[in-house]
Structure formats: structure tokens, C-alpha cells
Image (cartoon, rainbow, N blue to C red):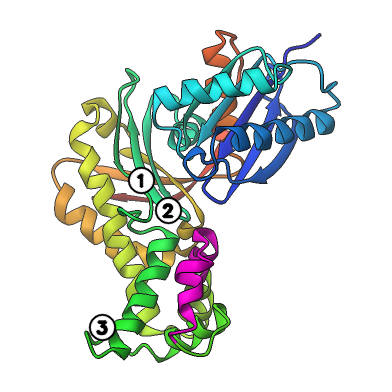
Amino acid sequence: SMPFFGGIEGGGSKSSMIIIDENGKCVGESSGPDTNVWQIGATEVSNRINKMVIDAKNVAGIPTDQKLASLGMCLSGGEQPATNKEMIKTMSELYPLMSESLIIKSDTAGSIATACEKGGMVLISGTGSNCSLENEDGSTFGCGGWGHMMGDEGGAYWISHRAVKYVFDHDDNMDSAPCDPTLVRKMMYKYFKVSDRQGMLNSLYSDFSKSNFAGFCKVLAVEGCVKKSDALCLHLFKEAGIVLAKHIIALVPKADKAMLQRADGLQVVCVGSVWKNWKYIKEAFMETLSSHLQGKVSSITLVELNGNSAIGSAVIGAKHANIPISVDLSKNYRVLYQSTI
């Protein structure tokens, strides 16, 4: 029977799966909830992944007891080889019919493999944020991605939290917000379904959900920036632009010289829902890059993935299993922004 190759992209809030054939054609897809081992543990990750595999096999018309030739998983929380090894052990014990070959890498690896032939950089700004560089020789370097307790600057949770913090500090007379917080306060009460700051304690502590809290970012963008051009909302995305740019600046010294000198400059894959607000991030982001990288990088191309970065995971899986497959990567992305620095 013909070999099939699975790929899973696992984020902090949701996951998606793709099955491709040896010509890179998508034959089945599925989706599921978050698959971060640090949030839910190895057994639950295995259960969720197995369910996605079965769903995708069903869509593809592959018998569920026919093993995939390979399964590449690029998961949020998949940065540590030792943890990944444990996870693979758990998976193959619990679900031996999933796939012949299994590999787990970080979520950033899948995004790079989806758009870049010879290494590249990815800047994730979804629920959290993370930046990763992969050189052509396979060496990888990272900046950020330490989760909401330790950073995640420029991600949706960080933006939401910062908005809420501006309101709290302003109303405590601890610090005045950089712009009038009236609209942000009103939207905050509405989004979290409360009438005062005491009511917020539930959402912050006993009923805390990172993805729900991060969801407030969309309200700040749509209701605040797009509909009302609210000064504080615009300021928040400007701040996000600055800190997101700093991730790239941090990794440029680690990049292959060849990568920085390519025709289209440094290619950065931009992943995550916060990039939908590029219009409000752009100016501060580019100013920050220019002031730090002039003379070091000639130009930059930001690309967004068209479809599923699970394609990159499938490519990584097939490579790991030493099976050659042909995938045209140029179909997988579009240029978000291109500029000299």
C-alpha cells in the first residue's frame, strides 16, 4: 500500500493535523485542542494526538489500523529532547498503530520547514510568543517562548494582560495609563462579564484560562483599533511591535551570514493570530528593526503561511524516517511585508 505521512502542529490553544502522500498532496486533515505537554501531561497529549490521527485517517480513507509511514509533530512545549523521547515512548506504548516512525520537535520547527528550504527564522505571536532560528547546518537558536509567567512578550496574552494592568494601575492611582483607559475598561468588563475589578479576580485566579484571557486581545484589536482607533489600544499594539522586533534583533548575530545576504534578505515566517493586526504593529516593529540592524541585515521579508504549518511537520517526519517526498514549499506562504532595513 502507498505510504502516507502525518504532520501535526500543536499550539497552546489548538492543534491541527494533515496527512500527505509522497507527492506532497494533502489527503486528509483534522484538528483538536491544545497539545502542550507542560499544560496537560504526556498521556493526555497522546490521547489527543491519537484522536486527531484517527480523524485524519478517516477523512483520507485510510484504515485506522494501517500505520502512517511517519508522523512528525511540532508541538508547543516540544523544545526538550529528553521530554520528547518520553512522550514518544508513551505514545508508541499507548497507540502502537499510529505510525511506523514518530518524531517530536518544537512548534517553531514546523513553521520553518513549511516555508524555508534551507533554514530560516520564525516569529510566533499567538497566545504566547517565541522566536526561533534554524541555520542551514541544522543548528537552532531561540529567543523568548518562556510562557506567560516569564515573558511571552508581544503575544495575545501579554497584550491582554498589559491592557488590564493599565486599567488596574490607573484606577488605583498607582500609575496613569499612557492614554485614556475608558474604552479598554469598558471592553474589559464586557469581555470578562464583570462589573468591577473585584469581579476580575475570578478570571485572574480561580477560573484562570490562559487562552480565554488571551482572547481579550482580539477585542482590543477589532473593537479598539479597527472600529474606534482608540489611543490606548493603538499604543498596546505599538508596544507589541517593539518587543516582537527585539526577538529578531536578538537572533541575528546567530544567523548564517549567507542567510542574511539572500536576495530577499532575511526571511521571517510570521505565525499566530496577532499578526492579523500587522497594520497596527508595523510602524513600531520596523522602526525598532531599523535602529538596531542597519548595516547588519540589508532587507527583510516577512511571510505568512497560507495553510497549515502541519505540512512542515509532515516534511520533518518523512525526513526523520529517511523517506524522500516532494513538496513544493512556495505554495505554502505569501509575503506579508518586504522592505530594506
Determine the image quadrant of residue 19.
Answer: top right
Q: Secondary structure at mark 1?
A: loop
Q: Is residue 200 magenta?
A: yes
Q: Which mark is residue 65?
A: none
**What's the mark number on residue 178?**
3
In x, y percent, where is residue 53?
72, 30
- Against 141, is 205 above or below? below
Q: Position of residue 152 (x, y in %)?
A: 35, 54
Task: Please tell me which residue is depicted at 28% across the width and 89% down the height of the picture.
Answer: 172
Residue drawn at point x = 67 percent, y = 38 percent: 48
On the picture, is 212 further left or further right than 286? right
The residue located at (45%, 76%) in the rendering is: 201
Q: What label sits on residue 145 in the rendered view?
A: 1
Q: Residues within 10 Å of mark 3 (few under 14, many from 20)?
A: few
Question: Can you say which quadrant of the picture contains the N terminus?
Answer: top right
Residue located 63% across and 18% down the image: 92
Q: Nearer the viewer, mark 1 or mark 3?
A: 1
- Looking at the rendered structure, which numbered label has been put on residue 128? 2
* Disc 2 and disc 1 in contact, CB within 8 angstroms: yes
Asked if residue 149 is positioned above or below residue 322 in the image, the reply reads below
Name the kind of residue labelled 1 in the image. Gly
What kind of element bears circle 2? loop
Q: Position of residue 297 (x, y in %)?
A: 21, 41
In the depicted view, which residue is nearer to us: 12 or 9?
Answer: 12
* First along the sequence among labels 2 and 3: 2
Is residue 150 inside the magenta stretch? no
Amino acid bearing label 3: Pro
Q: Which residues are magenta?
A: 197-217
Q: Is residue 192 above or below residue 265?
A: below
Q: Is residue 151 visible?
A: yes
